Amino acid sequence: MRILITNDDGVHAPGLKVLERIAKALADEVMVVAPETDQSGVAHSLSLSDPLRLRKITERHYAVKGTPTDCVIMGLRKLMIDSPPDLILSGVNKGQNVAEDVTYSGTIAGAMEGTLLGFPSIALSQCYSPAGTPWSCAETLAPDLIQKIVARGFPPGVLMNVNFPACEPSAVQGVALTRQGRREQELMKIEARFDGRGNPYYWIAFEKPRFTAGEGTDLEAVAQNRISVTPLRLDLTDDPAVAHFAGAFG
């Protein structure tokens, strides 16, 4: 098996090292193509107005001055074009990618791009708490979980979003097949500040979430110390809405 891995936290992120060890437990050939710098929150963006800079670190480690989407394209259409991977893994992200997070996440985007190009793809994220980031949770439990997902097979146009709870492996309460949740309040806000010359500037900030996790959701699973596995579709069409608007336009 050949595996291509990427992330959105950057080529030097600890989660990428964890993912490489996970991948090496599954395959003899692992190719790392990751962003040169942190690309968290870039979602499924790609570079069209700027050139891509590719830096070779070792024979199987590359950094791209670009987004996770750029990295997957570079891996598939250049570095592995003659020996394409059997699987693409994106992560391990520091922090959960659940609910509306998936629309912003570069980690999800890496797996999304792999799926668009026809390759089985999985996004992996490790939840954390004030006590720290228990990387051993993902590192210990991901290989077996990935093998089970791969053995079952991927429906067309579907990627898998996996979130590991913020606990040690021994405290995990099983695996839950979940749907994408939704938080109940608007978390985003604009925080205004002033520089040394008195000029205003702004940060996008987030309120501490307060919500009740819906039953069967990714939010509920990680809150219960379960691994959340959510199939995500590339096709965003809402079929009930299609039926609702049928005939409305003549």
Image: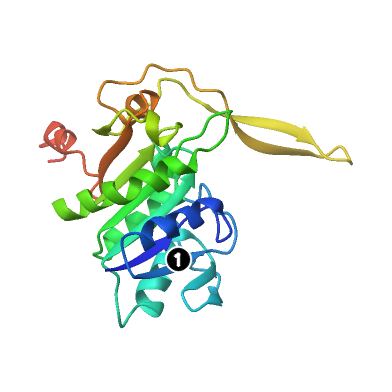
Q: Residue at x 39, y 38 (%)?
A: 164
SS for dot 1: helix
Q: Is residue 4 visible?
A: yes
Q: Is residue 155 visible?
A: no
Residue type, numbered disc 1 = Asp
Visual colour scheme: rainbow
Q: Which residue is most to the right?
A: 197
Q: Is disc 1 surrounded by few (<14), some (14 to 19) or many (20+) residues within 10 Å?
A: many
Q: Residue at x 58, y 59 (%)?
A: 12
Left/right placement of residue 113 relative to residue 49 reads: left
Asked which quadrant contains residue 89, the reply is bottom left
Quadrant that contains the N terminus: bottom left
Question: Residue 217, position in %: x, y?
Answer: 29, 28
Q: Residue at x 31, y 60 (%)?
A: 26
Q: Which residue is most to the bottom?
A: 82
Asked which quadrant contains residue 167, the reply is top left
Left/right placement of residue 225 relative to residue 15 reads: left
Of the pair 139 and 204, the residue shown nearer to us: 139
Question: Residue 207, position in %: x, y?
Answer: 57, 24
Q: Which residue is mark 1?
A: 70
Of the pair 8 and 117, the residue shown nearer to us: 8
Left/right placement of residue 192 relative to residue 117 reads: right
Left/right placement of residue 230 relative to residue 7 reads: left
How many numbered callouts?
A: 1
Quadrant that contains the C terminus: top left
Of the pair 102 and 137, the residue shown nearer to us: 137
Question: Residue 14, position in %: x, y?
Answer: 55, 52
Question: Residue 9, position in %: x, y?
Answer: 54, 52
